[in-house]
Image: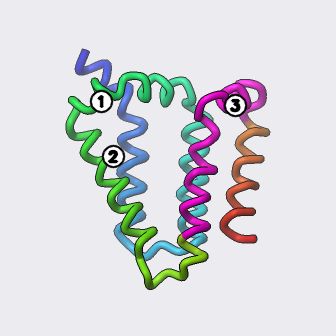
Amino acid sequence: KEAILGALLEPFTSLQRRLLDLLDGPVDSETWLAALTELVDHLITEPRAFQLLNHNLVEIVHHSDSFSEHLELHRRTEQLFADASIPLETRVRMACALSVATSVIEVGASALVAEDPRATRDLVVEALHAVIVD
């Protein structure tokens, strides 16, 4: 069971590590947009895997390495949004863009991915640009 869970978590663990590496340095709107685009690409490629992980959160909590990295990702993202050296408008746009990026696999929205993954991806990335850049 542990090996199956580890295999299921691997793509998400790799993505989390890349996002944590990104948060090691200065993050501007362009960098954040690139990271969220990668997240959207990942979520659209593996929507069922993400939903399966959400439904098995208790098991994931016991897979401590992956879950502790996930908690660290949340902590570092909160630090980014609290960084007063970044203008408030930029931080608000970054936070809103994160919600846009993850909404593609939330309740009901997964039907959009099933209907046309490529078009859904392109439209979500367009929405990210609208939130962050416009």
Q: Position of residue 35 (x, y in %)?
A: 53, 58
Q: Quadrant of the C terminus?
A: bottom right
62 up-or-down from 88: above or below = above
In the picture, the disc for residue 60 is: 1
> Around disc 3, counting alpha carbons within 10 Å, would you say few (fewer than 14), some (14 to 19), or many (20 or more)?
many
- Separation of residues labelled 1 and 3 (CA atoms): 25 Å
Q: Which residue is mark 3?
A: 113
Instruction: Say which label, 2 or 3, has the lower sequence index.
Output: 2
- Separation of residues labelled 1 and 2 (CA atoms): 10 Å
Q: What element does badge 1 sit on?
A: helix
Q: Position of residue 67 (x, y in %)?
A: 28, 40
* Three-letter amino acid code at the position of disc 3: Val
> Around disc 1, counting alpha carbons within 10 Å, would you say few (fewer than 14), some (14 to 19), or many (20 or more)?
some
20 up-or-down from 134: above or below = above
In the picture, the disc for residue 70 is: 2
Q: Quadrant of the N terminus?
A: top left
Image-quadrant location for residue 59: top left
- Number of numbered discs: 3
> Is mark 1 in CB contact (under 8 Å) with mark 2?
yes
> Is mark 1 in CB contact (under 8 Å) with mark 3?
no
Stretch of the chain drawn in magenta: 92-117
